[in-house]
Amino acid sequence: MATYEVPKLAKPPKARKKQVVLVSSGDLRLAANQTCWKAQRKMEIALAKAVAAAGYEVVRAHPYKPAEKHGFISSQKEGMKVFAGIDPAAKLIVAEAVWQYSHHVLPGLLDHQGPILTVANWSGTWPGLVGMLNLNACLTKAGKKYSTLWSEDFTDESFVKNLGKWLEKGAVRHPTKHVAALKNIKIPTAERRLGNALAKQLRREKAIMGVFDEGCMGMYNAIIPDELLNPTGVYKERLSQSALCYETSQIGDEEAQAVRDWMQQRGMTFVTGSDGVEFLTNEQILTQCKMYIAAVRIADDFGCDLIGIQYQQGLKDMLPASDLIEGMLNNTDRPPVKNRDGRRVLYKGMPLMHFNEVDECAGLDALMTYRVHKAMGQPVENTLHDIRWGDWDKSGTVDDYVWVFLISGAVPPAHFQGGWKGASSERQPQMYFRLGGGSLKGISKPGEIVWSRIFIENNKLKMDLGRAGVVKLPQKETERRWILTTSQWPIMHAVTYGVSRDQMMARHKANHIQVVYAKNALDADKALLAKAAMAEAMGMDVAVCGTKKDGKQWGR
């Protein structure tokens, strides 16, 4: 008989009945983990007290790392090692006070057999709730059951009650009465006909989504499998950030300067300094302008209808941040780019849609939004935002709960108060972007918007849509919100109609949300229904969330 070396698998220690295992996923970047650790530790202490008050004990599955000065799981490999030492049947909490890379913990969570609870602090600073929403969406796509909770200080009645439910029962559910299936909503003939026609056109004529490296920051939820994407009529052109880097190096200073001059002539402000470590420099701006030209030319080379740049990993060590480029691309009125022989203006009179962080769900949404709004004569500029945070208006200007929608890139100046004149560029935070690069900063103008999100559940594309209004807040209140989030990034003050804070958190399956303006409330309602009809005709399960501006239910 042959003798083989059969591996012996060590069994992890079994968790006691009243123990809860805790893990915390972090960033891949050391500087971010070090900077954010203090907030994470504060959150974990408060959470542990709440668990203890319910009669349970929190046991951290991985230690603080003195050499690295943080206690996060900071890679997929580390996450696999940590989960190998966790009792698969244990109650497990994923605690997040920071932006996190979901793939650090996803392999372990998918194999975990015990109840899973994702928890975030209600803060926009780093922010944990954005990281939690991304992880929730990844788990949803993977078909893994989980529960989720959020709190400002982990002492409020709702959190304590729901935590107790999860500890005793292993699950907690949130009411989602604000969600209505599209099949229960009557769509007027004109909007139905338009949506169906646009879906049919897309399937027949097809479109190309240019992807400059997939899977930004471990966002498994942001990758649409080809077998789900292709039936809609959209196909990926898989591009490389190295090609973008090379093409950028081929652009001359004169062409790049012309791009910057164009923006400044439109009224844009660049906030610069001499120290590239702390400030945005002229050299960084010029390189970003070269990247803008390079991105447009590569998109034209491959016939792309839209593109997405991963940028957070890899490219960040080669070039300044791509955020300025992304917002420029999403604007109809933008610096013209000619092909290499100078004979043809590329994508003339239209945006070259860009989906930030290669979020392909946002990309597909952007393409649909553009086509619906163009056909309806509505503004076509659209973008994703992080659902960064929210708070009541401290100035007393509006009575509603006001969301902070915020994103590092992709926001077109057409969304800003004052357009290009209301736009500025500041150096991206050093802990994320060593080589700097400017943002495209501004305050979104008041108006009526449609919000939406495509996500994957049960191996099927789904879309949620809703209506909201962008409100104007005093500068002092805007600054308060910027300081509590990221002041270099563009901001939108949004009031979601018929959707409360907790309803949004309970239902939304992404860290991102897509937004587009309409000329007025009635046009926004019609545009929502036309896009919903298009999505349904493309094979998606569609739901409408909340109400119209006047509080009336959809279909009435």
Image: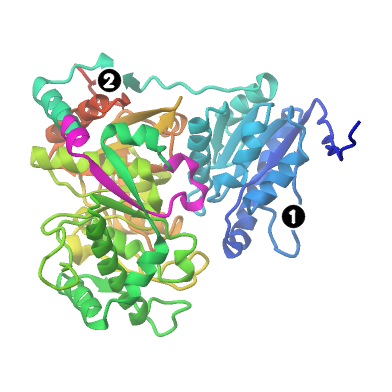
Q: Which residues are magenta?
A: 200-222
Q: Which residue of the protein is positioned furthest toward the bottom in this rendering?
A: 274
Read off the residue under disc 1: 64
| Dot 1 alpha-carbon crowd within 10 angstroms: few under 14, some 14 to 19, many 20 or more | some
Q: In front here: 422 or 476?
A: 422
Give me the residue at 35% from left, 62% from top: 323
Dot 1 amino acid type? Tyr
Looking at the image, residue 138 sits to the left or right of residue 266; the answer is: right
Task: Locate residue 270, reporting x and y percent.
Answer: 29, 74
- Callouts 1 and 2 close, C-beta under 8 Å: no
Give me the residue at 23% from left, 43% from top: 207
The relative height of residue 70 versus residue 169 in the rendered view (above or below) is below
Task: Locate residue 157, reporting x and y percent.
Answer: 58, 28
Looking at the image, residue 43 sits to the left or right of residue 538; the answer is: right
Q: Is residue 522 magenta?
A: no
Dot 2 amino acid type? Leu
Q: Quadrant of residue 112?
A: top right
Q: Is residue 216 magenta?
A: yes
| Dot 2 alpha-carbon crowd within 10 angstroms: few under 14, some 14 to 19, many 20 or more | many
Q: Which quarter of the rendering shows the N terminus?
A: top right
The answer for how far apart the CA atoms under marks 1 and 2 are is 48 Å
Read off the residue under disc 2: 182
Identify the secondary structure beneath mark 1. loop
Give me the residue at 61% from left, 63% from top: 30
Q: Which residue of the protein is positioned furthest toward the front in this rendering?
A: 1
Give me the residue at 37% from left, 65% from top: 243
The answer to which of marks 1 and 2 sits earlier in the sequence is: 1
Identify the secondary structure beneath mark 2. helix
Q: Which quarter of the rendering shows the C terminus?
A: top left
